[in-house]
Image (cartoon, helix red, strand yellow):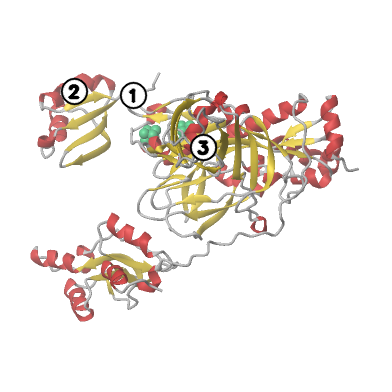
C-alpha cells in the first residue's frame, strides 16, 4: 500500500521513521526486494558535494542615514549586481575580483560571510531626490545584513560529463587540469548518492521539496535553468538562508586558468511512497552513465571519447584508446556521504520534515542552443581545401617541387596515408643550408598540431599563436588530412570583411 | 633524499652534474630538470649518506644545493577530499582510503607542482609553508 508524505511526516514527528542513505538502500533492495523495502523504509537520503558554479546570494543591506539607491556595488572588490531596488544586490559565485582576478571571487565573499569575517562594501549611485547619496563605503558582516538568501539558478545536475584532453598541451577547465594526449580523466557528481539519479522521473522532487543545503534547511524553487529533462540532464533551482549555513558544507574554490566556483553540499530526502520509489533509489554507480568528452575541442558539442559508468570512473583508472588512464573526481564523495548522513540524522531526530512538491519538473524538455546572429566562421569555411601531401620517405627536393608547383609554404607529411608530420619551406631552406639533402622524414616537424574542420577560427587562431606556427593541418575524425589552414587564410578573412 | 641543484645563468653551459658524478662516484638519479638560458634547476635523488659529499662538490663549483625535506604538503582545513589531485600526479602520491578520504605517500613526490595548480581549494603547496 502506498504511503503519503503527510504519513511519513507523522512518523518523523513520532520518532518512528526508518531512514537510510541511498548507499544503504541499494543493498536493502537487493536483499529483500523493492516491495518489502518500500514497506520498511520511509525515507532515503541522498547527498552531493561539488562545484556549483550557478550559485549566489540575494543580500539586503538596510538603508543608510542619507539614503542611497545603489547602482553599482563591490564587495571585497567583487562586483555584486545591484539593479534591484535601492539596497538589494545579488552576489554571484563566479564573479571575480577586480584586483585579484580568479584567485578570489563571489564564492570567496560568500565563504567569508559564512565564517563571520568582515567584508568591505563600496557602492555608487547617480543620486535622486529621494535617494540623494552618491557614494558609500562600509564594512559589514553577515549579522549586519537583514537578509542573505542563497538562490541558485542551476544546481544538482542530474548527470555530468567527464572530461579528458586529446590535444598536445595541458588545458585548464572547470573540470580541472587536463593533461595532454588523453593522460587523465576528471569527473563530477556523487553517482549512487546523487539526488536526481535516485528519482530520475522527478516524482518527488519539484517546487516545494525540502532539501539540505550548505548546512541549512532549503527548498527547491522549481526547474533550474538549462534544465533538459528530455536528455536526462535535469537541474534544480534551489534556495536557503545563508545565515544558517556552515563552512563545513560551503567552500569557495578557484580553478587555475578558469575562475571561481562554490562547492556546496546539497542533500535531498526521497520519500519511499511505494515499490517504484524503492526501486528507483536502489540505483548503483554501475547504472549511471557518463560520457567522457574531449574538452580540448572548443565547441558546444564536444566529441564523446567513450561512455563509462560511475563504477568504472571510481575504480581509479579507465581504458581510453587502449591505454589505462587515471581518473580523478572533482566533487568529494566523502563529503557527499557526510551530507546524506547528516540529513538522515536530522530526519531521525525529528528536526527535518519532508516538504511535498507542488509541481514536478517539466517532462521532455530540451535545451536550445544560443541564437547567434553574428556567427564566427569555422575552419571548414576558410581553410585551403586542396590537400597537398608528401610521403615521409620522399626526398626534400620532391617536397620543394610540390611547394613551388602549388605555391605553398607548408605540406602535410603522410606515412601509410596517416599524418605524421609537417614540412615547411623554412625546414627545407635549413636542410639545404646545412648541406642535408635527406628525406622529408629527417627534416619535418613531427609533433604536428592539428585542428578539426568544425572548430571556430578564433579558437584555432589562438592555437597558431600559442605554438608559434603559421599553418595547421585540418583532420577529420578518422585522422585523414582534409585541408590546411594558414595564417594567410585568417588574415584574408579580415581584409575581405565580415564572413557570412 | 632529494636535493635541488640551482645553476646560475653563467654556469648553465658547463657539464657540472657530470663532473660531480665522475669526481665523487656517487650514484644520482635525476628526478626532474628545468634548464634554460636564464639558469637551471635540477632535482636529484641520492642516498642519505652521500649528501654531505655531493653538497660540497656542487658548492665548490658555485652551484647552490638545497635539501628538499618539505615535499608536497596539504592544508587539511582546506582540503575537501575530492581527489582532483590524484590524476595529475605523475608519481602516484595521492589515492583514496577506504572511506574516500585522501591518502598521501609524500615520499614519492618529485615536486613537479602539477597538483598545486589542480587543487580547486588551494590546499596543496610545495614551498614548505603551511607544513607541519
Ligand atoms: S608536486 Fe608533483 S609529484 Fe609531488 S605530489 Fe604534486 S603532482 Fe605529485
Ligand atoms: S584536490 Fe585539493 S581539495 Fe581535492 S583532495 Fe586534493 S588536496 Fe584535497
Give the secondary structure at mark 3: loop
Q: Quadrant of residue A99?
A: top left
Residue B86 can be seen, yes or no: no
Work out whether disc 2 and disc 3 sit on a shared chain: no
Subunit bearing disc 1: B
| Residue that label 2 marks | B55
| Residue that label 3 marks | A131
Disc sitting over residue B128 in the figure: 1
Disc sitting over residue A152 in the figure: none
Name the spot of residue B100 as percent of width and height, x first: 57, 32
Name the spot of residue A177 as percent of width and height, x first: 42, 44
In the displayed structure, does residue B72 sit left or right of residue A425? right
| Contact check, label 1 and label 3, Cβ < 8 Å | no
Foreground mark, 2 or 3, reads 3
Does A323 appear above or below A450?
Answer: above
| Contact check, label 2 and label 3, Cβ < 8 Å | no
Name the spot of residue A139 as percent of width and height, x first: 46, 26
Front residue of this view, candidates A329 and A154:
A154
Q: Quadrant of the N terminus of chain A?
A: top right
Q: Upstream in the sequence, badge 1 or badge 2?
A: 2
Give the secondary structure at mark 2: helix
> Which residue is situated farthest in the front direction here?
A129
Does A18 appear above or below A175?
Answer: above
Foreground mark, 1 or 3, reads 3
Q: Quadrant of the C terminus of chain A?
A: bottom left
Near mark 3 (Cα within 10 A), the count class, few <14, some 14-19 or many ≥20, is: some
Name the spot of residue A32 as percent of width and height, x first: 82, 39
Front residue of this view, candidates A87 and A307:
A87
Amino acid at each position: 500500500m502506498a504511503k503519503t508524505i503527510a504519513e511519513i511526516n507523522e512518523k518523523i514527528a513520532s520518532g518512528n521513521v526508518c531512514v537510510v542513505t541511498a548507499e544503504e538502500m541499494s543493498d536493502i533492495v537487493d536483499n529483500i526486494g523493492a516491495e518489502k523495502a518500500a514497506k520498511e523504509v520511509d525515507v532515503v537520503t541522498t547527498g552531493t558535494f561539488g562545484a556549483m558554479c550557478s550559485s549566489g546570494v540575494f543580500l539586503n543591506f538596510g538603508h543608510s542615514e542619507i539614503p542611497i539607491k545603489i547602482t553599482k556595488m563591490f564587495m571585497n572588490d567583487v562586483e555584486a549586481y545591484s539593479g534591484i531596488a535601492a539596497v538589494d544586490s545579488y552576489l554571484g559565485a563566479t564573479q571575480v575580483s577586480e584586483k585579484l582576478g580568479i584567485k578570489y571571487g563571489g564564492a570567496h565573499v560568500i565563504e567569508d560571510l559564512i565564517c563571520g569575517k568582515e567584508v568591505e562594501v563600496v557602492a555608487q549611485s547617480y543620486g535622486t531626490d529621494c535617494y540623494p547619496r552618491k557614494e558609500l563605503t562600509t564594512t559589514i558582516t553577515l549579522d549586519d545584513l537583514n537578509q542573505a538568501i542563497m538562490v541558485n539558478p542551476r544546481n544538482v545536475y542530474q548527470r555530468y560529463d567527464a572530461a579528458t584532453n586529446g590535444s598536445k598541451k595541458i588545458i585548464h577547465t572547470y573540470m580541472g587540469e587536463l593533461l595532454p594526449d588523453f593522460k587523465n580523466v576528471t569527473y563530477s557528481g556523487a553517482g549512487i548518492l546523487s539526488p536526481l539519479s535516485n528519482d530520475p522521473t522527478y516524482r518527488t522532487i519539484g517546487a516545494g521539496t525540502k532539501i539540505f543545503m550548505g548546512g541549512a534547511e532549503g527548498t527547491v524553487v522549481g526547474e533550474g535553468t538549462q534544465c533538459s529533462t528530455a536528455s536526462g540532464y535535469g537541474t534544480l533551482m534551489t534556495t536557503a538562508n545563508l545565515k544558517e549555513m556552515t563552512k563545513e558544507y560551503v567552500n569557495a574554490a578557484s580553478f587555475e586558468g578558469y575562475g571561481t566556483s562554490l562547492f556546496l553540499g546539497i542533500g535531498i530526502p526521497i520519500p519511499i511512497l511505494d515499490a517504484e520509489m524503492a526501486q528507483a533509489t536502489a540505483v548503483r554507480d554501475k547504472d549511471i552513465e557518463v560520457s567522457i568528452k574531449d574538452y580540448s575541442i572548443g565547441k558546444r558539442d564536444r566529441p564523446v571519447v567513450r561512455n563509462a559508468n560511475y563504477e568504472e570512473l571510481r575504480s581509479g583508472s579507465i581504458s581510453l584508446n587502449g591505454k589505462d588512464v587515471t581518473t580523478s573526481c572533482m566533487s568529494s564523495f566523502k563529503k557527499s556521504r557526510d551530507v546524506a548522513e547528516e540529513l538522515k540524522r536530522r530526519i531521525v531526530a525529528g528536526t527535518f520534515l519532508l516538504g511535498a512538491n507542488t509541481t514536478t519538473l517539466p517532462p521532455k524538455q530540451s535545451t536550445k542552443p544560443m541564437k547567434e546572429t553574428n556567427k564566427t566562421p569555422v575552419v571548414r569555411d576558410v581553410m585551403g581545401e586542396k590537400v597537398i601531401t608528401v610521403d615521409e620517405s620522399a626526398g626534400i627536393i620532391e617536397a620543394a617541387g610540390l611547394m613551388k608547383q602549388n605555391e605553398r609554404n607548408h605540406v602535410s607529411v603522410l606515412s601509410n596515408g596517416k599524418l605524421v608530420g609537417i614540412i615547411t619551406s623554412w625546414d627545407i631552406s635549413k636542410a639545404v643550408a646545412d648541406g642535408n639533402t635527406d628525406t622529408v622524414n629527417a627534416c619535418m616537424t613531427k609533433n604536428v598540431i592539428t585542428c578539426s574542420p568544425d572548430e571556430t577560427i578564433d579558437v584555432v587562431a589562438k592555437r597558431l599563436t600559442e605554438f608559434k606556427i603559421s599553418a595547421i593541418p585540418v583532420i577529420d575524425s578518422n585522422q585523414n588530412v582534409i585541408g590546411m589552414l594558414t595564417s594567410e587564410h585568417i588574415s584574408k578573412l579580415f581584409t575581405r570583411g565580415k564572413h557570412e | 633524499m632529494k636535493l635541488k641543484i640551482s645553476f646560475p645563468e653563467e654556469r648553465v653551459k658547463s657539464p657540472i652534474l657530470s663532473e660531480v658524478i665522475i669526481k665523487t662516484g656517487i650514484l644520482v638519479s635525476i628526478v626532474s630538470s628545468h634548464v634554460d638560458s636564464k639558469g637551471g634547476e635540477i632535482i636529484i635523488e641520492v642516498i642519505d649518506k652521500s649528501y654531505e659529499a655531493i653538497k660540497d662538490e656542487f658548492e665548490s663549483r658555485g652551484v647552490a644545493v638545497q635539501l628538499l625535506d618539505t615535499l608536497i604538503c596539504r592544508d587539511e582545513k582546506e582540503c575537501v577530499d575530492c581527489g582532483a589531485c590524484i590524476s595529475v600526479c605523475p608519481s602516484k602520491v595521492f589515492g583514496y582510503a577506504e572511506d574516500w578520504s585522501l591518502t598521501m605517500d609524500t615520499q614519492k613526490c618529485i615536486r613537479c607542482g602539477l597538483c598545486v595548480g589542480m587543487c580547486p581549494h588551494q590546499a596543496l603547496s610545495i614551498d614548505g609553508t603551511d607544513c607541519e
